[in-house]
Amino acid sequence: MSTHDRPPSSGRDTQYPGTDGLRAEVQAALQRQDWDAATLGLRELLRRFPADAGAWIQLSYAESFRGKYRDAREAALSAAGSRAATASVAADVIARLRTFNEVRVLRDYLGLIGPPSRMPIPLLLAAAAQFSYLNDQSSALALLDEARRADPDFPTTLIARAQILTYLGRFEEAEREVVRSQRRAPQIALGWSLLANLRRQSVDSNHVDAIRGLLAQPGRKPLDQTYLASALHKELDDLGDIDGAWQALEQACKTKRATLKYASADSRSLVDGLIALPTAIPAPALDAPAHVPVFIVGMHRSGTTLLEQLLDGSPQVQGVGELYDFTSAMRYATDHHCKGVIDRTVVERATDVDFADAGRRYLDGMAWRLGGERFFTDKLPSNFLNIGFICQALPQARILHMVRDPLETCFSNLRELFSEANPYSYDQLELADFFIQYRRLMAHWHAAYPGRILDVDYAELTRDPEAVMRRVAAFCGIDYLDAMSDPRSSSRAVSTASAVQVRDRVVRREVPKWAPYAKHLQPLIAALRQGGIEVPDIPA
């Protein structure tokens, strides 16, 4: 839960008479952020009416703000066991269950509140968004299909379907949905972002003028400006207008950065704390584990999705995508709800963690996703921060670390919109500093856990995929197959920034993508070099 989240309001509830005064006290406590008082009042409400799902959700938020992750989770689970009085409360329950990665409970809850055919469109959209976040794209699409039947031309539904269809590799259908949405709502900025990225634009077919016109309109929200400027960058880049594309990218990055709270000093402090932790190497399990996680880590945009797609070509491996399940296990172990994959509080409490229990909790939480394959991939790049914890909690785990050229990696980060996941990626100096800290931490993990991590070079993977994948297969303990050298062998859903590119064959760039922008990237280049990172010269 973000520290910016707020619990839903506690208004008058005719379903539970005689509680107006207590509810008013609770609401006042919530508004002044007196979480202790709010918790006491909510628990009294629930003592009287234990089936009040809305009160359970408020209690879950209040406990989170009190720093009680486990109590907050239990309150969310209690809410799921009660029938919501309104669709709004049901949407709140769904969101909280996703917060705690309680997907099995979420599925059961949808059955409790009724069949999709009887759900209002806002609730269908809310549920679909949570399933998509959890990389269950098939369930998300089924809910959106129901919403589309209720109103075939509702723009929000069409845009949401376009996103899911993109993740599923159904690009032509996705484009048709966006175009259809624009008949009623051409002002939706996300639609233009999707259109720009679904295919390569050409002089004869592009949306540059339309996007510029929308950007020029006054009163645009920062997020809309970011989507539009990013879309304009992509299209101008396709058309070869490098200076125009850079100007659009700068606008997108500055607008996005202004909405985020981030300090490089916090990342440096986090890495310092991780490096200072004691190293513990658990004894290997005597029995062969039923499931072996293969963690794929590294910087975002370093090729992690490509590697997972290739591994998914093996019948021994199930690709499950980007998940926060290990973070959820560590949140529970430390009784702390960190924002993002990890924070300094998790590090400070890690010395008291029962890592064997954390590993079991992680595997138990993953069980519903897994089929008969012994190996499964968990591809959250930022789990590189968790490597020390993973090594202690899951001695059977394999860790694959994608390594890509520093400037290619950083420039690709700079060009991508990451919601709030990577706040360091919108400023050249902050991006360089984070990359330097990442390299420093990876060097530490290699020294602390020798033999547990295999570096996989992206350039070598694109140059000779068979040789690299044979090495990866041997490290993981799986059999190599030719299908593991062609990402088109996998048909699984891909819900990352690489959703479009990864559907194609492995391609090696002769000229790096950053090269035409080199004159604009001098602050990034200088900062990387100052931090001891080798950056190649600009190609002639």
Image (spheres, rainbow, N blue to C red):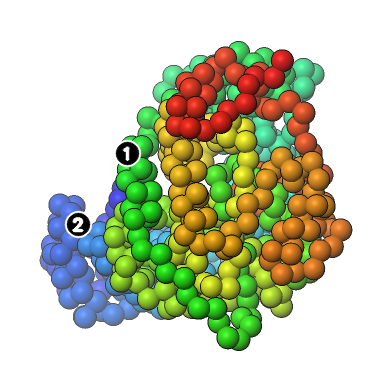
Question: What's the residue type where badge 1 is placed?
Answer: Ala
* Residue 538 point in image, percent of width and height: 64, 19
- The picture places residue 284, in percent across and down from the top left corner, at 55, 78
Q: SS of the residue at dot 2?
A: helix
Q: Residue at x 36, y 63 (%)?
A: 278
Q: Residues within 10 Å of mark 2 (few under 14, many from 20)?
A: many
Residue 30 tag number? 2
Q: CA distance from mark 1 to mark 2?
A: 32 Å
Query: Which residue occupies 76% across, 55% down?
Result: 469
Q: Earlier in the sequence, mark 1 or mark 2?
A: 2
Relative image position of residue 378 (x, y in whole percent):
59, 61
Please identify the residue farthest to the bottom as the structure is shown. Answer: 287
**Residue 397's mark?**
none
Seen as rendered, the residue at the extreme right is: 482
Residue 265 image label: 1
Residue 403 quadrant: top right
Q: Secondary structure at mark 1?
A: helix
Measured along the vertical axis of the image, is residue 505 above or below residue 115?
Answer: above
**What is the x, y in percent for residue 431?**
46, 33
For residue 102, side relative to residue 5 (left or right) = right
Q: Nearer the viewer, residue 149 or 435?
A: 435
Residue 147 in view here: no
